[in-house]
Each structure stands twice: as C-alpha cells, then as structure tokens.
Amino acid sequence: MKAYSINPQTKQVEKLDITMQANTVYTFFSSILIDELTSLNGHIIYSDSNAVSEYKTPFFMGEQLIVGEALIVGKNGMEEVDAFISADDLEKLINYEVPSFYIDAFELFKDTDINLYKLFQLDNDEKTELNIEWVLHVFNISDDATKGYFLNELKKSEDIQKTLQMMALLAFNASQH
C-alpha cells in the first residue's frame, strides 16, 4: 500500500510501500496510543498520541497541528487504501515553522498526558465539545498579553488539563461576543 511518512525533525516526506496489518501503525510509532486525523481529504493522518508529552517536533499540515512523525494512508469509506495525494502536493501543505507560542506551551505539556485532539465538554449551557488544539490555535492568534496570561496560568497550574479546559471556556466565551 502506498503511504507517506513525514519527519518534522529532518523536514522530509518519504514515500513508503507498506503492508497494512493490525499492528502496522502501532509498530511504525512504537506506541499503542495513536491519533487518527481526517483533515486531509480522502486520507488518514496517523500520529503518536504521546508525541506532546515526549516533546517531539510540531508542524502544520494545512491548518492541522501535528506533533512528531506522521503516517498518511488513503481512506475510502472505512477502508484504508493507497495514498493518492502526490508527494509534491503533500509537501506544499506542510509548514515546519511553528510559532514560539506553541513551543512554549508544549514545554509546559511535557511530562503530562495531554492529547491535542481528544474532545472534552465545556461547562457551559450548550454542551460544546472542543479540543486542546483549538484552544492553542485561539490563544496563538490573540495579542501578546493574552498569550502571556495563558502561559503564566499554565506555569502556575497544578492540573494543566483542568487549566486548559478553563482557558477553553474563556476563549469560547470571547469568541461568542
């Protein structure tokens, strides 16, 4: 099966010929905790759920924040198929320049079990579900004072996950006005 691997440390996209079996993705990452992202049309982007806590290198694919290596295969319904995006088109989507705000936040996340993509429910009337990736994106586009507030609150926090959920509620409420 045609697939791609992306290594943000070497900034290389490699075309792979893999045999998809039950343990292929787990073996690729040497991990049993895998995130499946579907932000690339007709493809699945696999990444290591532990990459944030292991302080691996982040990058963007389009607007999707990914941490550590990624494995990309095609998707047809529920079935994994050959990746059909060209290597050139894939490389055009990748941006290895990650704002320092993200790097500073990830420094605070190491030694935690933070997952960027796991949904959590806000404590609001609407039962809104968000993830940490969204929270980081919103605070990244804010002014420097707000970014500083965010990072300082995380530094003081004894429960980073809970603080991030509080920040999500603040960001969500601010976006509604």
Image (tube, grey):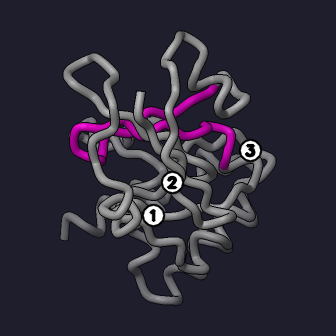
Q: Is residue 58 visible?
A: yes
Relative horizontal placement of residue 151, taking residue 38 as reference (left or right): right
Q: Which residue is mark 1?
A: 60
Secondary structure type for disc 2: strand
Q: Position of residue 162 (x, y in %)?
A: 59, 46
Q: Amino acid at mark 1?
A: Phe
Q: Which mark is residue 66?
A: 2
Residue 62 drawn above or below residue 158:
below
Q: CA distance from mark 1 to mark 2?
A: 6 Å
What residue appears at the point 66 percent right and 61 percent down from the top-left corner? 57
Q: Which residue is mark 3?
A: 112
Task: State which region is magenta.
Answer: 33-51
Screen quadrant of the C terminus: bottom left
Labelled pair 1, 2 in contact (Cβ < 8 Å) = yes
Q: Position of residue 131 (x, y in %)?
A: 42, 46
- Please report whichever mark, 3 or 1, sits nearer to the chain's N-terminal start: 1
Q: Amino acid at mark 3?
A: Thr
